Amino acid sequence: MKRIKVNLDKKISTSYDITIGSDIRDRIGLMIMKDYPAGRYVVITDSTVAGLHGRAFMDTMKAAGLTIDLIEFPAGEKSKNMETALCLIKKLFDLGVDRNSLLIALGGGVVGDITGFIASIYMRSVPYIQIPTTLLAQVDSSIGGKTAVDLPEGKNLLGTFYQPKAVFIDTKFLETLSDQEYKNGIAEIIKYGVIDSEDFFQAQESGIEALKNRETSHLLKLIEQSCRIKKGFVEIDEKDNGIRHILNFGHTIGHAMEAESNFTMPHGYAVALGMIAISRICEKLHNLSVNETRRIEKLIAAFDLPPLIPTEIPTDGIISRLHGDKKKKDGKVQFILIKNIGKPFWNGGVDRSTLVATLEGMRK
Ligand code: GLY
């Protein structure tokens, strides 16, 4: 088992540990009991995770001596709204949850985001713990305290920064993950190599089969390194005012494509396409070598993440969403770019014609 500390400015939030291991569920209950004592615990999860892991998880928590209840909501992004939040809040009241209680988010990004959001507002805040069960949540959304629900006007428009008391990551949960969900996480792991570490990128290049086969020892290394990279950005810029934007590499174009597909395109696919587009732009405008662009494309392709933008997502639509984006300067859309693998920079304005040519170049 590995433990990473996220050190935050004490004036804003306290620091917390990310504990990573394989098949550590029995011990998570004991660790929570010992290190995060509370009068009552409530697990918030969705219908999918409840079916897969709910009962076994509750059994281990009860065996550790916790007074614990579980509440669930229907799985999926469409549940990530105020209606679900209010419904869960009502259930918390009915259970008698107070400020001496602790919430536990057991699930993927939607569960983590909505539980964190509720924890930040219920009775002016109650503590919560993240137990992410998807690869994407384990390497990204469970760390850093971004909480949110969606509004009809867009995703994540209502939210807070509210850090968990702890994050517990168990690779055992990944065994039941669909291929598509697993690839969503892989795209984020690739991103960490591209934005922060050539060595990490290289480790991924030499471990393609191990990652594809979900080999525990390899996964543990990749998850640990991803968490270390993410916590580094969060420690410097908890409220996402500057350097934390680097974590959005590939995401601006990715989000535009996701929205243009009416959110039918999986997040990992959109991020992968966004990273390819930005790498090609960096090759055109900022001397990123052809070799490095190809390495990024090759690593993405090795996991069957798509290299081409589907025809039903028109270039015009992507461009107008990008131009509607507030990150614009002198008519140019601003992106996180890279000089080399592992060397990102901000303020890279990209003109419309380069964007159009790049996106069109990803059609065949
Ligand atoms: N997923 C980007 C961030 O947490 O800032």
Image (spheres, rainbow, N blue to C red):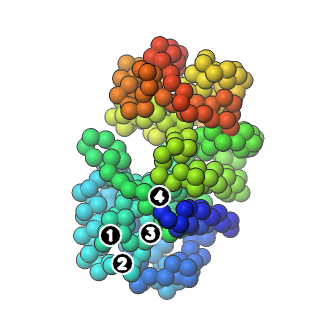
**Which callout, 1 or 4, points to the residue nearer the camera?**
1
For this view, does 44 lie left or right of residue 234? left
Task: Find residue 145 and name its label.
Answer: 4
Q: Name the secondary structure under disc 4.
A: loop
For this view, does 186 lie left or right of residue 148? right
**Mark 4 or mark 2, which has the lower sequence index?**
2
Mark 3 packing: few (<14 Cα in 10 Å), some, or many (20+)? Answer: many
| Foreground of the two, 124 or 105 | 124
Residue 236 picture location, percent across and down? 58, 52
Q: Name the secondary structure under disc 2.
A: loop
Task: Find residue 128 and name its label.
Answer: 3
For this view, does 46 lie left or right of residue 182? left
Distance Cα–Cα, label 1 vs label 4: 16 Å
Task: Find residue 124 and name its label.
Answer: 1
Image point (47%, 52%), residue name: 239
Q: Is residue 362 visible?
A: yes
Distance Cα–Cα, label 1 vs label 2: 9 Å
Q: Amino acid at mark 4?
A: Gly
Distance Cα–Cα, label 4 vs label 2: 19 Å
Q: Mark 1 touching mark 2, by CB under 8 A?
A: yes
Q: Name the secondary structure under disc 1.
A: helix
Residue 355 picture location, percent across and down? 48, 19
Mark 2 packing: few (<14 Cα in 10 Å), some, or many (20+)? Answer: some
**Mark 1 or mark 2, which has the lower sequence index?**
2
